[in-house]
Image (cartoon, coloured by chain):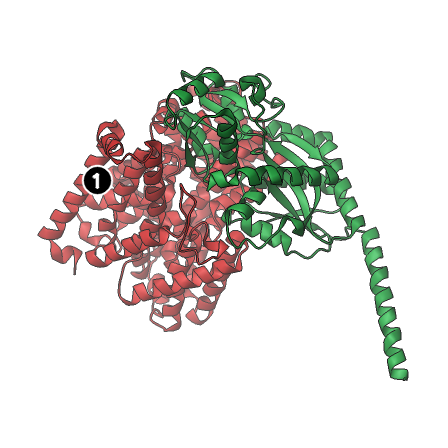
Chain colours: A red, B green
Amino acid sequence: MLENLLLGLSVMMTPMSLLAVLAGVTGGVIIGSLPGLTSTMGVALLIPLTFSMPAEAGLAMLGGIYLASTYSGSISAILLNIPGTPAAVATLLDGHPMSKRGESTRALALATFGSSIGGILSIIALFLIAPPLAAFSLKFGAPEYFLLAVFGITVIASLSAGAMEKGLMAGAFGLLLSTIGAHPVTGDLRFSFNSPVLYDGIPMVVSLIGLYSIPEVISMVSRKRADIGKAAEAEPRGALSYLPEVLKQKLNILRSSLIGIIVGIIPGVGCSVGGFLSYDAAKRGSKHAEEFGKGSAEGVLASETANNAVTGGTLIPLLTLGVPGNPVTAVLLGGLMIHGLRPGAELFTLNADITYGFIVSLLVANILFVPIGLIFARYCAKVIQIPTSVLAPCILALAVIGSYSIRGSVEDILIMLFMGLVGFVMNLFAVPRAPLVLGLVLGTLAESELARSLALVRGDVPAFMMQLVTRPICIVLLIFCAYALYQGVVQHRRNPQLLDD
Amino acid sequence: MFGTAKRTMAAIGLTLGVALASSAQAADFPKKPVAMIVAYSPGGGTDTAARVLAKYIKPHLGQRLIIQNKPGAGGQIGFTALANAKNDGYKIGFINVPSIFLVKMLREGVPYEMGDYEMIGNIQLDPVVLTVPADSPYKTFADLIAAAKAAPDEVTVGGDGPQSNNQLQLVVAEDLLGIDLNFVPFNGSGPAITATLGNQIEASVPSASSATSHIQSGNLRALAVFADKRYPFLPDVPSVAEATGVEVPGIGASMRGVAVPKGVDEDKRRKLEAAFKAVVLDPAFKEHVERMGLPLAYMSADEFTSYLSEAEAGVANYVELLK
């Protein structure tokens, strides 16, 4: 093990490779913090640039972008209440209330250190125990995915603190929206209004931009939040002084990292689900559950630690089996292939120098985004002191450009504005938006995996039910679902004022 | 009087000017970067192939080739954008066959016709392969056919879908081999391969390029490649005719070629054709795509056009079975 680490270090410690990581991390921090620019897009657009670089430097740069952009979605979530990436939605729930309280630096520091620690732990898992974990990832068939999505949906209970009925309504609306577009198994078009842009469903990032930035712009214009700037100034402490606070929450960090790594290993689930599940677990396990949603440090830390722990997790099946877990790793797989590297055992023996060099570069990237992110965030924090008359039109312009740039489609701007209207109405009636996002993310997964499960048994419903109670992972997931619902109901009964103010 | 004459003169002058300008345009074409529409998202297989082309074509084209992603609706948005693009030669498109037919034939109200395009050339051909897990009881295609005949609709076969080129290939094979399999669509060849590796399904029909590394590493076994020749990166895998004795046309093979909207000046088309032909012959480009495992299959504009009209008829015969 040690010799592999040293081998990796020797490959990585060249000016070229270090510069590549630095460039990747810097680019990634910027890409991630701008809503509309996603990690996938960043990695995809830079792949041609890596063609002419040495393999280890090219991969180091792509890895840097991936890790840094997954983290930096939290910056805009905390400061502006607009998630830069879908993975930052759970961070926003507590990060923005903290920022409004005048604790922007604290929230950003928690997010940064949490992300870094989660990321590092997941890379250590990749380094030490990748092969057995990869074998686990193949155990996930359609029924397991379906139950995992159902379990994820139970998180709605945690996301709708203070308004259970409203949260359920928002979640159901999210699930409904997720059914727009072609049926995942039959290809039938639903609710598409004969418009090709809706054939693939509502694009996630576009709806996220609308849902969060438009209501923000409206409330700025209506001068509801002219006070945020001065609150932020009353914070003299530096970001580094919050590191001990982060390290004190050992249990939270370990639990969140573990959840993130497991979610990452399962192909096709993704960073945002890791963030949501870990937020939920942190809330259930917390002594101060009532603070969640109102600016809980534990919440920010849980969500951010987990969504970056997903990154190392997704690389496990990628490097050992050639199975990409999300769009970014699919692009990374292309990057590996271009350099003639084939995932599998060969990667760890024949090409060990490049592979371990890549792993070391990921560790470097996880550490490097801490200073870069904090410096960048310090300038970003000034954004909230900008007069709203300037800031609001800027956000609106960014929202339009961001939603257009995803697919180069004008119709996506209309979808963004529609979702903005939905977000505004939800805000007006104090309906939480996070359950809607969760429904949208998991609805597609739940529906397509249910349909696929049934297709696998030729539509035999009893056979499918049997699978749910006989496959080992399914049994575990069913127990999780039952426990989550039981606890939700009991908590709700015992403590209604906590959940329904 | 004078007014009319003047106007006539002006009109003649204008026409002449335009004609001169257009021939002059063709002579120094391309004067500025050429944009290529790709109907799929950044980072996907088609997009990556397009970006590699763009990297190597510059010396042959004399200008940069810029990739414009117009993803969505299984390619429909990008193909429509190409059909409606300005035909000045500066807007070209990467088209995927047979997806471009399938979208048109399976949906209502698709606003393009094959007549809206003129072909420049084909670059790649990526056939469909039939794969099973390494420990599968099916050692040959014949084993799988025997199992499917013994229990119709019981053998599950995963693949990109629904209504994909992979499903089309399977449907054609089922029809000609007289078997009935249970096709289960996955969200791409990658997830179908993952499910095969994990023994969640009995077999899968991914694209050859995405399955090659898994076949070479021994994690998947390929029973046949749906093409009339063997696949260059998998020389040990029999073609479908070798494996079954039945000629199954490889119309499900995914082809990536270049097209322009109808009405582009002939000289410009010839220039584009020459540039794409030159890049496919470029040793540096060849080496690069070989490392990526992308199979080249160049066809000139005329060859590609006649291949397409033949393939369109073939696809039309089977499209009902996909609905």
Q: Considering depth in this image, is A125 or B265 the residue closer to the camera?
A: B265
Q: Considering depth in this image, is A383 or A265 the residue closer to the camera?
A: A265
Residue positioned most to the bottom: B1
Give amino acid for label 1: Cys
Image x and y of residue A190, in percent: 40, 52
Residue positioned most to the left: A494
Image x and y of residue A111, in percent: 35, 47
Residue marked by disc 1: A481
Q: Which chain carries label 1?
A: A
Residue A180 falls left or right of residue A410: left
Asked if residue A120 is positioned above or below residue B92 in the image, the reply reads: above
Residue B254 falls left or right of residue A208: right
Res A108 visible? no
Image x and y of residue A386, in percent: 44, 66
Number of on-image labels: 1
Res B108 visible? yes
